[in-house]
Image (cartoon, grey):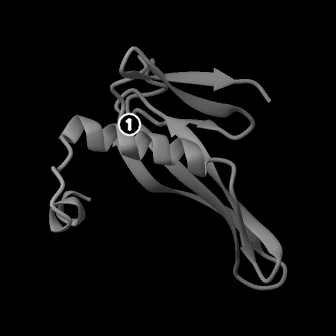
């Protein structure tokens, strides 16, 4: 990102500003369907742990016509400087917000995470 900004003679962003940008991007991309041949095969979700904000993908994986499973994996991450979270376990497994929408707000120049119901 900073390299692209510098190429057009603009100042680069600080690490904090880049983290804010990625956090907003994760928020914008949540709840987007992943499709293959007009069939929904997955979705993007907001996930949150004590240390990270994560855009997670959940997709249906088929080994053959009858055996299907779901795979969940991270797509994009940012540091969680915004919301104090309690660790679910010793691995800091993220909370996955499959049914809630997470809103990012700017309050007095600082980002704030708001968890909305369905």
> Residue 20: horizontal and vertical position, in percent?
36, 37
Above or below residue 102? Residue 78 is below
Above or below, comparing residue 100 to residue 112 in the picture: below
Left or right, 37 with reference to 114: right
Quarter holding residue 115: top right
Q: Position of residue 57 (x, y in %)?
A: 59, 57
Q: Which residue is mark 1?
A: 52
Q: Residue at x 21, y 45 (%)?
A: 13
Density class for disc 1 (Cα within 10 Å; few <14, some 14-19, many ≥20) is many
Q: Is residue 52 left or right of residue 48?
A: left
Camera-side residue: 11 or 55? Answer: 11
Q: How many marks?
A: 1
The residue shown at (58%, 51%) is 29
Instruction: State the image quarter where residue 4 is shown.
Output: bottom left
Q: Give whichever of 73, 104 is nearer the camera.
A: 104
Closest to the observer, 21 or 68:
21
Q: For the point 22% across and 59% down, which residue is it? A: 5
The residue sitting at 83% across, 74% down in the picture is 39
Q: Position of residue 55 (x, y in %)?
A: 51, 49
The quarter of the picture where the C terminus appears is top right
Q: Is residue 83 left or right of residue 33?
A: left
Quadrant in which the N terminus appears: bottom left
**Is 72 rendered above or below residue 63?**
above
Residue 27: x, y in percent?
55, 41
- SS for callout 1: strand
Question: Taking 89 as reference, is 43 above or below it?
Answer: below
């Amino acid at each position: 990102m900073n390299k692209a900004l510098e190429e057009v003679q603009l100042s680069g962003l600080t690490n904090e500003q880049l983290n804010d940008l990625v956090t907003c991007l994760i928020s914008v991309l949540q709840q987007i369907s992943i499709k293959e041949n007009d069939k929904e095969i997955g979705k993007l979700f907001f996930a949150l742990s004590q240390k990270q904000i994560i855009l997670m993908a959940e997709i249906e994986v088929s080994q053959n016509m009858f055996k299907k499973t779901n795979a969940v994996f991270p797509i994009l991450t940012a540091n969680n400087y915004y919301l104090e979270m309690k660790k679910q376990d010793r691995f800091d497994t993220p909370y996955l917000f499959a049914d809630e929408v997470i809103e990012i707000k700017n309050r007095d120049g600082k980002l704030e995470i708001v968890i909305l119901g369905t």
